[in-house]
Image (cartoon, grey):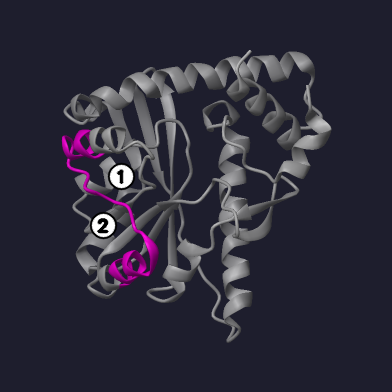
């Protein structure tokens, strides 16, 4: 009966318009199961990192290569499974990386978020305005990397297809990559069983440099959306469906 449940239902109908009502209900139950699990896991991530057998890393040699070469890349991913496992894995591999996030509106909640992440070695950075962007660029020039989530609605962003529907998407990760190495390093997290996970380091997206900056940014944003969509289609029960990803017009036809 919550608004979040209704949003998740509408999102599923937009992404998978041909699903039967029974399939929609099954996915709704499964995604709430994942949300409930990660809500509990957030409180004990420092304990999970102490049990290495809980996390399997696929293609970890790519992270080792980034660390050894001092290569600056822009890590991109989405809110998949328990997404906190991704920055934790980057830190474990010794990659110098700025972990960006959107600060919580409540300063007390925000402080708890930052303090809890520090318990398992993740220092969060909430860039604000031009000074924050300059700090990120300075880090990239030093050979450090930056990690960002790029799967939520960004008002004022670029309209790019996501499940066949235009969705406003932040161009920031692509812009940052174009100003540094031109590499978007994609990653995803999968839940294997209970509080056990598989981190997949995917093939990097090497951005176009056509000479037209706007064209290259548009192309990069589209490729990120395509990557996230592919991950969601593979494991739809593990995406964060309660966020309003599409413009309000897309929801008009899905009113309950």
Horizontal placement of 58 versus 13: left or right?
A: left
Horizontal placement of 3 versus 205: left or right?
A: right
Residue 244 shows which numbered tag?
Answer: none
Q: Nearer the viewer, residue 130 or 51?
A: 130
Q: Look at 48% across and 36% down and name the residue there.
A: 80
Label located before the other in sequence (1 or 2): 1
Asked if residue 74 is among those painted magenta in the image, a careful observer would answer no
Quarter of the image for residue 143 reads bottom left
Q: Look at 22% across and 44% down and name the residue there.
A: 122
Q: Residue furthest bottom?
A: 211
> Where does residue 153 sit, x and y in percent of width and height?
58, 47
> Where does residue 207 sit, x and y in percent of width and height?
52, 71
Q: Secondary structure at mark 1?
A: helix
Residue 97 shows which numbered tag?
Answer: 2
Quarter of the image for residue 66 reads bottom left
Q: Give the residues in magenta.
A: 114-137
Q: Is residue 71 visible?
A: no
Q: Is residue 121 visible?
A: yes
Q: Secondary structure at mark 2?
A: strand
Query: Could you tell me if the residues under marks 1 and 2 are in contact, i.e. CB atoms within 8 Å?
Result: yes
> Which quadrant of the rendered structure holds the C terminus?
top right
Q: Look at 26% across and 41% down and name the residue there.
A: 88
Residue pointed to by mark 1? 87
> Where does residue 226 sit, x and y in percent of width and height?
62, 52
In the rendered image, the vertical position of residue 161 relative to residue 86, given as above or below = below
> Where does residue 4 sit, x and y in percent of width and height?
59, 24
Within 10 Å of disc 2 (Cα), the crowding (few <14, some 14-19, many 20+) is many
In the rendered image, the vertical position of residue 245 relative to residue 196, given as above or below = below
In the rendered image, the vertical position of residue 226 relative to residue 131, given as above or below = above
- Mark 1 → mark 2, Cα distance in angstroms: 9 Å
Within 10 Å of disc 1 (Cα), the crowding (few <14, some 14-19, many 20+) is many
């Amino acid at each position: 009966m919550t608004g979040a449940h209704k949003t998740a239902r509408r999102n599923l109908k937009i992404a998978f318009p041909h699903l039967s009502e029974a399939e929609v209900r099954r996915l709704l139950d499964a995604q709430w199961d994942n949300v409930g699990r990660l809500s509990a896991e957030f409180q004990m991530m420092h304990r999970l990192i102490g049990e290495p057998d809980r996390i399997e890393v696929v293609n970890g040699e790519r992270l080792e290569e980034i660390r050894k070469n001092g290569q600056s890349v822009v890590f991109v991913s989405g809110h998949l499974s328990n997404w906190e496992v991704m920055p934790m894995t980057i830190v474990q591999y010794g990659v110098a990386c700025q972990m960006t996030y959107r600060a919580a509106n409540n300063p007390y909640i925000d402080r708890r978020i930052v303090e809890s992440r520090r318990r398992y070695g993740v220092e969060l950075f909430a860039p604000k305005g031009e000074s924050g962007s300059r700090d990120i660029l300075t880090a990239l020039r030093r050979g450090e990397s930056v990690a960002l989530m790029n799967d939520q609605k960004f008002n004022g962003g670029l309209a790019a297809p996501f499940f066949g529907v235009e969705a406003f998407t932040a161009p920031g990760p692509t812009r940052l990559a174009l100003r540094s190495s031109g590499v978007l390093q994609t990653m995803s997290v999968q839940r294997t069983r209970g509080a056990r996970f598989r981190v997949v380091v995917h093939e990097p997206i090497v951005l176009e440099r056509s000479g037209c900056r706007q064209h290259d940014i548009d192309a990069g944003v589209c490729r990120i959306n395509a990557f996230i969509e592919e991950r969601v289609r593979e494991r739809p029960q593990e995406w964060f469906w309660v966020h309003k990803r599409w413009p309000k017009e897309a929801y008009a036809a899905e009113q309950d």
